[in-house]
Image: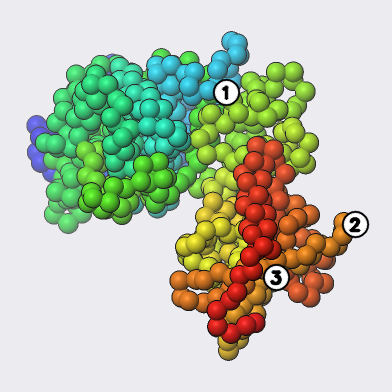
Amino acid sequence: MATSTLGKEASLEAILNESIHAFDDNGELEANLPRMLLLMHRWYVTSAELAGKLLIMYRDCKGDGCQRTRLKICYLMRYWIVTFPAEFNLDLGLIRTTEEFREVAAKLGCEEHFRLIDISTIPSYDWMRKLTQRKKQVKKGKASLLFDHLKPMELAEHLTFLEFKSFRRISFPDYKSYVIHGCLLDNPTLERSIALFNGVSQWVQLMVLSKPTPSSRAEVITKYIHVAQKLRQLQNFNTLMAVVGGLSHSSISRLKETQSHLSAEVVKMWSEMTELVSSNNNYSCYRKAFSECRGFKIPILGVHLKDLIAVHVVFPDWVEGRSKVNLVKMQQLYMMFSELVSMQSAVAQVEPNMDLIYLLTLSLDLYYTEDEIYELSLLREPRNPKSLPTSPTTPNKTLVPLDWASGVTTKPNPSVVNKHIRKVVDSVFRNYDPDHDGYISQEDFENIAANFPFLDSFCVFDQDQDGLISKDEMMAYFLRANPLLQSQMGPGFMHNFQEMTYLKPTFCEHCAGFLWGILKQGYKCKDCGVNCHKQCRELLVLACRKLLRSGSLGCVTPDRGPHSRLPSSPSMPTDQDEVFEFSAVTSASPTRETKSITLMTGSAQRISVRLQRATISQATQTEPLWSQHSWGTSETGSHTFPKMKHRTHRENYQNKASVLGELTDHITDRRITRRGKDS
């Protein structure tokens, strides 16, 4: 395992001396030790410290062979510059030491040495610092950005482009930090790579679950199986693992009715792809296939990180205190890191459509929790009462190791997200604004929505309700809806939500919509008491303020400051028979007679609700239903049902209105008498 001349352990100075004499008088390398040292030294010392040791050896060299030794030291430095140039562009300490090295060579009059350690021609590697990198590309023509129109190879190529762009930015210190600490603390580059892996896996699940019928879901699964095959052809094993992991997740694997629509050929291909990335025999199938690949390839990052951790745990870094390096461990780590570095320096033969890249990137950043995805799966195919219960917390065992990357979400700077979203919006308007007037119609919006399974409706984008979406409106929506920005708002906006069953009519603090349902209608913050829909939790921009509780449990008043944007839910009387009154709205029309009904709750508590035939006030997802002034001067604090304006949802609300109307007419003909005490 170890080098033949040094044995199994050696001091760092001995390794340096051996590496220097691995070069002949013409600068030709005669051993592999210098490359191992220059790649692995950062596991033990910094690059500036290693260069400093070489500088001391160069400056203090004495004796008959002094000039020959100094020349070989410069050969080693030159080999370092040529083999790992990024270090001499990104490491400021190494750059300063190298310049000092050149000054010493110039003072000694060694012109050849001075030229050998020149770093002025090294290109910029600043792209490795950035989490997002845009490449200018001449547009070759319009291409369809619809998922249904993309061929499996086209989608696989664009996923490979994103994967390799993320993979090649991971540096040696990033790997070392994860292996030593076992976490992603202060490791944004590796965190971004893992978040992309999780994003692809979730995106696959969401694209399948976005289809309403089993046959259409089976078509999406079939397409992704073909995408997995193309990823195998491109030798992109990491994204292949993410795609197969998404299809093998419990939220998809439980869809038995959907799977019954898959052909036998597709089921066979699915099984083959799953077996390829399975963890059986320490990923033996993957390791065999990966070792047979030549040229460009992307490894399953989680598998190789686990290998690095295994070596790190088994072997110590130093022996005999900290005086000697464990060369057995150094050799083992070198073999793994050398392969990773060589793959990062390969060239991807992919020519992406950048408009599609922008849209695909935003789709992969739309984060959903495991519970939310599993609940959507249950809505598509409800659980069979006769089958054994499963839950998202105890999912069916999957063959793919998704646990190493679980719970990782990226946290970019808001300005970076803003810039990226603007690119997305520009791409959308370039491809879906046929007359180039700067507006998207509802018909064009339906095509855009195919790329994002869970976009809000047209009316949420169309804030001014003019039937068209402008660039500013779309930009505002994505900035508001992107969950990544919520973490940047600070602790004042972080609510402690808990799912609640409301015994009183309650409104959402975000969209001012009524919390419909019998049980678990919405979510309530345990700290400030705000209420909202499940889908509105991530979008709520109301500061969390502690409640001022009185002696009565029935009266909880949130402390609302001047920055509150939306009205709170109406306060409730605390009588035994509580009455929630929807006050009339002043208008030119004559006042209509109100009717009331009595609801019996699960706790035998009676609630009287007075209904109105007509509602006049309207609200949208982005505007408060009541202004600050009118709310502050209201004495009763009562609400009217909000009426949505968008025409695609009009039928749903008309149906609800007709049901209320029929109920009111029925009450008029047949009066409902309340049992017990008359309020």
Asked where in the image residue 635 lies, by quadrant, the reply is bottom right
C-beta proximity under 8 Å, tags 2 and 3: no
Image quarter (top left, top right, bottom left or bottom right) of the N terminus:
top left
Q: Residue at x 12, y 33 (%)?
A: 3
Disc tally is 3
Question: What distance separates the C-alpha of mark 2 from that of mark 1?
Answer: 51 Å
Q: Which residue is mark 2?
A: 588
Is residue 120 or residue 543 the one in the foreground?
Answer: 543
Marks 1 and 3, the one that precedes in the sequence: 1
**Residue 190 in picture, x, y percent from top left:** 39, 41
Camera-near label (1 vs 3) is: 3
Q: Which residue is mark 3?
A: 581
Camera-near label (2 vs 1) is: 2
On screen, residue 470 versus residue 277, left or right, reads: right
Question: What distance separates the C-alpha of mark 2 from that of mark 3?
Answer: 21 Å
Q: Which residue is mark 1?
A: 355
Q: Residue at x 66, y 45 (%)?
A: 654
Is residue 436 or residue 233 the one in the foreground?
Answer: 436
